[in-house]
Image (cartoon, coloured by chain):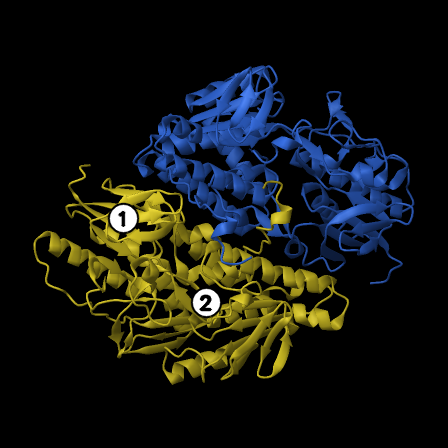
Chain colours: A yellow, B blue
Amino acid sequence: MSDSIHHVVIVGAGFGGLEVAHRLAGAPVRITIIDQRNYHLFQPLLYQVATASLAASEIAWPIRHLLRERKEITTLLAVVTDIDSADKRVLFEDGGAVSYDTLVLATGAQPAYFGHDEWKPYVGGLKTVEDAITIRRRVLLSFERAERETDDERRAALLTFIIVGGGSTGVELAGTIAELAHENLPKDFRHIDTQKARIILIEAGPRILPDFTKDLAAYAQAALERLGVEIELGRPVRDCTDNGIVFDGRNVAAKVILWAAGVRASPAADWLGVPADHANRVKAKPDLSAPGHPEIFVIGDTGSVDGWHGKPVPGIAPAAKQQGHHVATTIKLRLRGDSAPRPFRYKHAGSLATIGKRSAIIDFGWIRIRGWLAWWLWGLTHIYFLIDVRSRLAVALSWLWIYASGDRSARLITQDEQRSTLP
Amino acid sequence: MSDSIHHVVIVGAGFGGLEVAHRLAGAPVRITIIDQRNYHLFQPLLYQVATASLAASEIAWPIRHLLRERKEITTLLAVVTDIDSADKRVLFEDGGAVSYDTLVLATGAQPAYFGHDEWKPYVGGLKTVEDAITIRRRVLLSFERAERETDDERRAALLTFIIVGGGSTGVELAGTIAELAHENLPKDFRHIDTQKARIILIEAGPRILPDFTKDLAAYAQAALERLGVEIELGRPVRDCTDNGIVFDGRNVAAKVILWAAGVRASPAADWLGVPADHANRVKAKPDLSAPGHPEIFVIGDTGSVDGWHGKPVPGIAPAAKQQGHHVATTIKLRLRGDSAPRPFRYKHAGSLATIGKRSAIIDFGWIRIRGWLAWWLWGLTHIYFLIDVRSRLAVALSWLWIYASGDRSARLITQDEQRSTLP
């Protein structure tokens, strides 16, 4: 394809980046999409990989396969380390580079530990497939070690699971681990009673699920407590170590600590030399471009733009997709000569969170639903948004199996370096 | 349960070990089954995990979950490092130990490199889930790197895949990688023609598939060649490096070398201080006990016993299961006071191998089948032997999808340490 055609480079094939590519179909552009992984990940269900309910391949698809029919798109597996915005080039870790006319940065976020990077070895964040499989290994290994432990205190620590952060991810992790311990595992062990495992959800704020109404959050809290989750509110974590956490002046002994408390955006602001907010997101202009760079857009977790009850647009999949759509439309209009700034307007479709496999809360704004009906709606919605028919069938099969048999099928302890015969 | 009950300790929950446990149901024994992994793996389909056709959780099941209804069985996740046969104790890596009355060693085998352990970093053996995912990563990464490579010679090396060993595993890997490269991937790439990828199967012996008749092996060879596999016979590999292999006086440049040429049994013979054969298998007595240790049985890849046309019983799943059955019967008879030695008699049910997704060869002895009918028989047989209904449904779904769409669903590059945010 000729180099004179307008070249759109998209960094990051998450919900936002992929939406830009989809919405540019038929536009007079060539596109390069770059990601450091070879797959698009359906992040909202990643906690189910971490809790042994789904296989990673059920919620992830090779990017280049998704885009195979779009001959004007080139997919590259590469790690971006900087942007040369003067020369309009994206620079790669391996020394390579690619030039752009328009650049879309949709590079996402990583777990952030309130500035305590020293906690990282002890707490499991949940952003990548590897993270999810590592969490799965740690949780399952803790039960295995408890089964062989003869010291009461050490056994109790092995059977204590701490989840830091009371947003949707924390609630979903806590509910699923509680079901795993209290419902799925008891018959499998001989020396421990997995029903006595403690699942503790810690939230520094005054309540869980701050993005939901107080009523729905209270309902979710009661549902979690029925599953046996202990909820600790209003006191932040002071320290995380190999032996547990310090919190509220106490040390709580635990061998598994999961982190769902905060994220930090990729270093896009540093690459561009533009201001960032507290979570390192580029302070975007109303049209989602980066300040001083009208040809560079920052979407999803990469940028911060106001537009939700006076707060920044939330870092969720539907918001990233709306932004991707908006940017693609802007690019197409500009190519037709219409360069008037078009402010992005966010439409909040709703908030959803599940509590285990029987209950959920949904806030559509105009209607609020909770309980089993919400769970089925949540499930159908998520299956609908999965990318292909095979994944829909596979996830539906896995869920129906869990629902009917109580058996979580992906209970494998893998990715242990010592157990591989290969380097 | 009282310690006075006869205690059977089984090391290894593969096909042989698990069969002993199943066949001892109802016997007046208590059982401890020990494995260094938490899952039973359906090894015959592991090559499909390595070639992006199946997810690991579709062919692996938590051991303790499989045995959850058997209250007399304790499952332990532990690494065995030695046997104290004088004191009748199994010793663990972590300092623990367990005493036995009867011991069954079903500890399997690992890839062996003809005494060239220095080749190990460059060649991928296929024995564990981690091995399979590592092979998958290497194969898929090689295509990704080729897409970005500008040097013709280096690109050719990235698109050359060498499989060493012409037995069933080598044939199945070669056929599936050829289909992946020549049929599934071409539309996904822009700069490379994956149809030009070279898949080279190297066998030191005079023909592939020595366990099959000459006719069937010749049919398989022709079917592989139709898929675009190059077959090199009669010349052993002389060296393996980061840049490829030396073979027949030539250097063949390749970045991915897969090893299906030989295995070496676990160190059970060392633990017991008894003679081993060339593959480190304990030379078992006709009743499958270890020489000088009537209370210790060695089955599957751990032991070697004659019984197949004057050759040792082959290291395949049905043989291990028959041996497990035999040992369980022997244990039950002994507990009833019948200690007469009972020689094991192997019944060879048949040999099967697939060539890609359309052809297979089956030798039942009394009838030989080849082509698409053999493939369907092979598929149905393997689905039948999977352990639970969910796996049967999931594998059937994955295969039908591959058959109908040509899309292999598990094409994820994962388990890359650098890409995890966790240690």
Of pointers 2 and 1, the one earlier in the residue sequence: 1
Check the image and report above or below for A347 versus A14.
below
Q: Is residue B326 visible?
A: yes
Determine crowd level at label 2: few under 14, some 14-19, many 20+ residues with C-alpha closer than 10 A. some
Give the structural element (helix, strand or loop) at label 2. loop
Residue B376 percent coordinates (x, y)? 48, 33
Determine crowd level at label 1: few under 14, some 14-19, many 20+ residues with C-alpha closer than 10 A. some
Task: Name the amino acid type tagged 1.
Answer: Arg
The quadrant in which the C terminus of chain A is found is top right
Task: Identify the residue at horizontal 40%, vertical 60% (top origin).
Answer: A43
Q: Is residue A140 left or right of residue B257?
A: right
Q: Is residue A347 left or right of residue A301?
A: left
- The residue identified by callout 2 is A112
Q: Is residue B139 left or right of residue B384?
A: left
Establish whether labels 2 and 1 are both on one chain.
Answer: yes
Of A363 and B150, nearer the camera is B150
Q: Is residue A188 visible?
A: no
Give the structural element (helix, strand or loop) at label 1. strand
Task: Name the amino acid type tagged 2.
Answer: Ala
Q: Quadrant of residue B195?
A: top left
- The residue identified by callout 1 is A89
Residue A55 percent coordinates (x, y)? 49, 53
Check the image and report above or below for A178 versus B24.
below
Residue A256 percent coordinates (x, y)? 60, 67
Check the image and report above or below for A293 versus B304.
below
Task: Identify the residue at horizontal 27%, vertical 48% (top origin).
Answer: A89
Task: Identify the residue at horizontal 37%, vertical 59% (top origin).
Answer: A383
Chain letter for mark 2, please.
A
Of A78 and B402, nearer the camera is A78
